[in-house]
Structure formats: structure tokens, C-alpha cells
Amino acid sequence: MSALETIEIATGDNPTASVIWLHGLGADGNDFVPVVPELPLEDEPAIRFIFPHAPVIPITCNNGYRMRGWYDIVFFEQINREADLKGIERSIEAVRALIKQENERGIPSERIVLAGFSQGGAIAYSCGLTHPEKLAGIVALSTYMPAPEYVVRNKSAANQATPIFAAHGTMDTVVPPLLGRAAHDQLKEDGYNISWQTYPMPHSVCMPEILAIGGFINQCLAA
């Protein structure tokens, strides 16, 4: 996979931390740009938000229609079946290239939060939990674990204690809340530092959730 195109927004001069935020299937990096001004972030440190565009790929469950996606989905009604592991691994490597780019710009991995919504959240889980260097935090929104066996096989001790914010809408008909809860429960059982929040909403985000995400980012970067 070639380097991902991105949108960047900084909350101030000379950022000392970064948030890499991955969009959902069929969207693009613009999707969560409007969220940044709504986050109740501390004035310091300045944060660079990076919103990459997923590549355009054929999606099997949509009759092969090409759209932006982090990996293929075969069964839309049962999105946790027959995971496209090769696609997941390609996206993990592409996100790791963004992390490395931030490292080269002076932001260490422990000052990087990896966030994602829906399919982007699935990559945030899969990349974050297997990344060889400690990250500041992981934000997993309205998502699930697409290939739990991959994470178990490749999990990184460096991110065993990394804080994870997981949240889901109780009226989500795209990614059933049970899948989100199952991912949380499995990670909790495996000793990860994960929290779980639900909101009365469909497959989307809401202001109380945005406020909670901002608080989580502040906590992750307070050290």
C-alpha cells in the first residue's frame, strides 16, 4: 500500500503530541475534522490531528463497489465473519508508517493516540494492540475486533497497559453493540486497561461522547 493521503490540523504551534484518527467504511479523512474544535482539550500541549484517507478498494458485501475502506467486508450482516486479514495487515502497516512519520517529526510513540470509528476503530484496535512501541492511548468508537486471533498472536507487551477508550451507540444497527461489548470484555479479561461507555445513539457520535473523548485524550497526554 502506498503512503496514505492525510488531512492535518494542529491545535497550536510546535505540537508535542499527535492523534491519528481513522474514518469508517465509505467515508474519508474529512469525516471527523469538525470534531476537533468540539473536543475540550487543554491549551497545552499543542496536538497535531492526522486524518488519513483509506485507499479505494472493492467491498464484497456491496457487490464489489469500490469505496474507501481499510479492508474488505464479505458479510455486512455479520461483519465479524471471514475477516480480510491481508487487508487488515496492509492497513496496519500503513498506519505504522504514519506513526513512524510522526516519530521522525519529533513526536515519540508514547505521545501518539490512535483513534478510529467503525472500520477505522477496528484498525485502531488491531494496530494499537500489536504496535511494538508504547502508545499514549487508543480510542475505539462504534467498532469491534475484526481478527482477535491476529491480536492474540501478535500482541505487544509495550501496549498491555495502554489506556483504551471504547464506546458504542445502544441503537447501532450497523455494528451491533454486542460486538463492541464482546471486544471490550475480551480485552478486559486479558488484562488490558480498557473502559466502556454507551450512548443512546445509532452508528454515529454524539456530543457527550466527544466531550468524553477530549477528556480521555487530555489524560493520556498529561504525563
Image: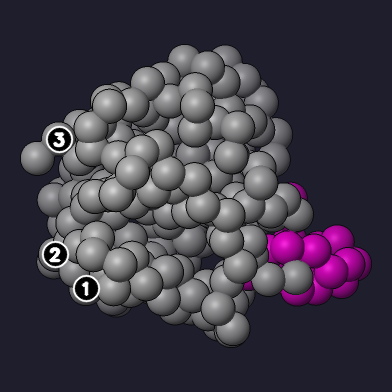
- Of all residues, the one furthest to the left in this rendering is 223
Q: Marks 3 and 1: which is nearer the front?
A: 3
Q: Give me the residue at 30% from left, 48% from top.
A: 15
Q: Which residue corresponds to mark 2?
A: 158
Q: Which residues are magenta?
A: 57-77
The image shows residue 196 at horizontal and vertical percentages of: 35, 30
Q: Nearest the camera: 156 or 178?
A: 156
- Is label 3 in a helix, a strand or a loop? loop
The image shows residue 67 at horizontal and vertical percentages of: 80, 64
- Is label 1 in a helix, a strand or a loop? loop
Instruction: Give the number of the disc on residue 82.
Output: none
Which quadrant of the structure image shows residue 26? bottom right
Q: Give me the residue at 24% from left, 60% from top.
A: 107
Q: Give me the residue at 30% from left, 35% from top.
A: 217
Q: Nearest the camera: 146 or 214?
A: 214
Q: As displayed, is residue 13 above or below residue 1?
A: above
Are the residues tagged 2 and 1 within 8 Å (C-beta)? yes
Q: Earlier in the sequence, mark 2 or mark 1?
A: 1
Instruction: Give the number of the disc on residue 222.
Output: 3
- Is label 2 in a helix, a strand or a loop? helix
Residue type at mark 3 is: Ala
